[in-house]
Image: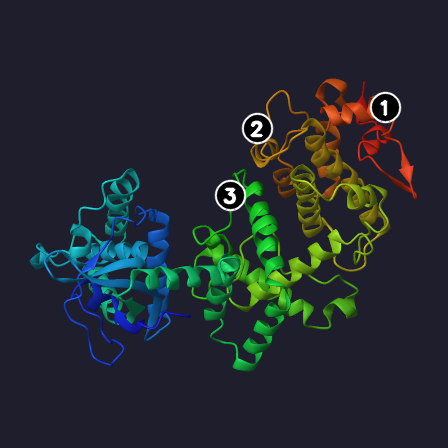
Amino acid sequence: MGNAVNLQLGVTTIGDLLVHKKISQSHNGNSLEDVELRIPDYQRPYKWTARNSIQLLDDIIEARNNNKEVYRVGTLILHREKNNDGKTIYNIVDGQQRSITFSLLLSALHELDTKEEGFKIDLLEQEVFDNAFSRHNIPNNLNAFRRRVYKENREENIDFIRDMKRLRDYIEKQCELIVVITDNLSEAFQFFDSQNARGKALYPHDLLKAYHLREMTNIDDAKTEQIVKEWEKIPQKYLAEFFGDYLYRIKEWVNGNWAYTLNEHNIYKFKGITKSDRTPYSQFYKSAFSYAELVNSSAMPFVSGTREVNAFQLNTPIIAGKPFFDYTKHYYNLLADIRDNSKYEGFYIKGDTIVKTLDKYYSRGTGNQIARLLFDTALLLYVDRFCPATYPTKVDTELFQQFVLYTFIWAYSLRAQYYHLGWLSAQNYILGRGGKGNVNSLNMYKLIADSDTPVSLLSLLADKLRPLSDGNLSKNVAKGIAERTVDHIEGGIYTDYFHFFKANTFYSK
């Protein structure tokens, strides 16, 4: 930490901090009284949405149901100083969003006691929320909490109200924050920056790792340690790319949604179904996973000559806990095989002339990288849905090769129409919103996910994909055609991807 010598560490329950205005245990083992929390002017607006807030509540309920005696809910960094009146105040440097959310939750829960009509949390009484985000999110999140914890007819819902009061006690007494206090503002920022810089690149998938490890209560320590070691073998940069660029985008595009950046607000898409979930929906997927595990661990595939059962599908829910780590390993290896033109177990892009050209001449530049991402993600979804892991037939392989061509035409039709290609144009194209000027703008991912067989998908694509004409092409592609260089070949590899449009009748003058 360098010069950060004045840092004091402590721990506090949510109730002590927000209701009783104290830190339960400071650095010397004693409680710290009269803790006046303040939100300084330099803090950002309150941006947590109702979705974020309810997710926090659900996580707490799950922790309580799993009998966790202490549930750590994050870190709070405080800068201690004297105000103009000489009173000690504690400015929140980090942890503001969570602190406000807990304040709103406790406010809603304390409304269950009519005798507490005057109950208030000082943190919410400050005049720092005069901005559009805070004015909307604070009352909206409070009302979302009220709807979850309050029943109007108290006599008919007495058991529910009692349970909510027990939940309130759990939050106040057993949910804890790690507290860091310093009298030096620069030290507070230094600590904040170091904390965030240390885990910035890893943040989304690192949070997922921690979440799913908490779900592995039925796994012994040796097995858990082995799982963590396997996870750590994968370079963290590649894991961040794998989840953010591939799995997350596929999940969004399949559902017709714009794919933003994977972060702490949308990682819920990878949290999945927990062992405590009892809905018919969750039971169906848990049963399917259990069946696949049972078959693959038995002698049934070998004895009967049947294929192994794939326990995962990209567009279905994840099973929380150990299956998440198996899921990650499965798709990471599958994607690595697809992107490696030298091999793919079961299905062969091996030696594919199109991929050779893309690998050698079109690996750099934003536009080329976007087109290649579309190509690879569509292949991954197709393989996941239609390609058996073992014993592929000749028909399986031939159908796959047809799809390789079709998805290339789709992905690189986008590239061929834009001299400067960015994500705004790409996402509109992917979601079928490219407009009249974009040939072959369609949601490939939804078409794959909605098709029951590869034959039906390929028939659909044969009807939908259209040739490009001179009027559609970017100036660099048009120049290559005019100068007759699109058919140029070096070392047995075509130097221009548009050659394959011509060779497969997807170009007309």
| SS of the residue under disc 2 | loop
| Image quarter (top left, top right, bottom left or bottom right) of the N terminus | bottom left
Q: Badge 1, how many Cα within 10 Å: few under 14, some, many 20+?
A: few
Q: Earlier in the sequence, mark 1 or mark 2?
A: 2
Labels 3 and 1: the sequence-earlier one = 3
Question: Residue at label 1?
Answer: 483
> Residue 90: percent from the left, percent from the top?
22, 62
Indicate the quadrant where residue 196 lies: bottom left
Q: Is 215 positioned to the left or the right of 59 in the image?
A: right
User: Can residue 156 be seen in this snapshot?
Assistant: no
472 above or below 181?
above
Q: Which mark is residue 433?
A: 2
- What amino acid type is highlighted by mark number 1? Glu
Viewer-proximal residue among 296 and 412: 412
Residue appearing at x 78%, y 46% in the figure: 359
Q: Position of residue 92 (x, y in %)?
A: 27, 58
Q: On screen, 197 above or below 373?
A: below
Screen quadrant of the C terminus: top right
Residue 374 pos. (x, y %): 66, 41
Give SS at disc 3.
loop
Which residue position is annotated with label 3? 260
Q: Earlier in the sequence, mark 2 or mark 3?
A: 3
Cα separation between marks 3 and 1: 39 Å
